[in-house]
Amino acid sequence: MLTSVPLSPAFVCGIANLRGSVVCVIDLPALLDPGAEAFGLEEAKSLLVVRSGERRVGILSAVLPDFRRVEAGESILPPRGERDIFSGVLDRGGVLVGLIEPRKLFELLELRLDGG
């Protein structure tokens, strides 16, 4: 269950209690593209919790994720951008899948929360 946070940025869906800890839950497309349409909570099918050190954030998803082991050398480098959070890209049968680098995700999240 999510609790809304008044006056939070559009990419913050709310907060959740995860085993006694409060976790911020975000809409990743809205974080990456401030002009993107907000994620509808009724569309949510899964919540992925990403951790980097002591930091944790929940990412809502409208699809059920398909988790697979990635072997060394299997990914290709993505185009670099100023706010790039991806460490690589996989080609899964013609569908490109981005690999998120948690440290970079938190850097972008902190930048956007500070108004950047």
Image: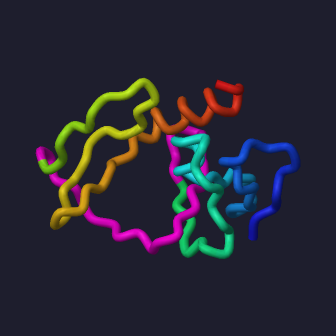
Q: Does residue 101 lie above or below 96 as drawn?
A: above
Is residue 14 left or right of 28 when viewed as pictured? right
**Residue appearing at x 37%, y 28% in the figure:** 81
Q: Quadrant of residue 93?
A: bottom left
Residue extending furthest toward the left: 73
State the scheme by which the image is colored. Answer: rainbow
Q: Does residue 67 lie above or below 100 as drawn?
A: below
**Residue appearing at x 46%, y 33% in the figure:** 104
**Residue appearing at x 67%, y 75% in the figure:** 42
Q: Quadrant of residue 77?
A: top left
- Residue 96 x %, y %: 25, 56
Q: How many marks?
A: 0
Is residue 8 left or right of 100 when viewed as pictured? right
**Residue appearing at x 52%, y 70% in the figure:** 62
- Residue 45 x %, y %: 55, 75
Is residue 63 left or right of 80 when viewed as pictured? right
Q: Is residue 53 magenta?
A: yes
- Give the position of the C terminus as an image quadrant: top right
The span shown in magenta is 50-73
- Give the position of the N terminus as an image quadrant: bottom right
- Residue 19 x %, y %: 69, 63
Q: Does residue 108 lie above or below 27 as drawn?
A: above
- Residue 9 x %, y %: 74, 42
Residue extending furthest toward the right: 6
Q: Quadrant of residue 38?
A: bottom right
Q: Using the image as rendered, state which of residue 6 and residue 72 is in the foreground.
A: 6
Q: Does residue 35 lie above or below 116 as drawn?
A: below
Q: Is residue 51 magenta?
A: yes
Is residue 27 left or right of 7 when viewed as pictured? left
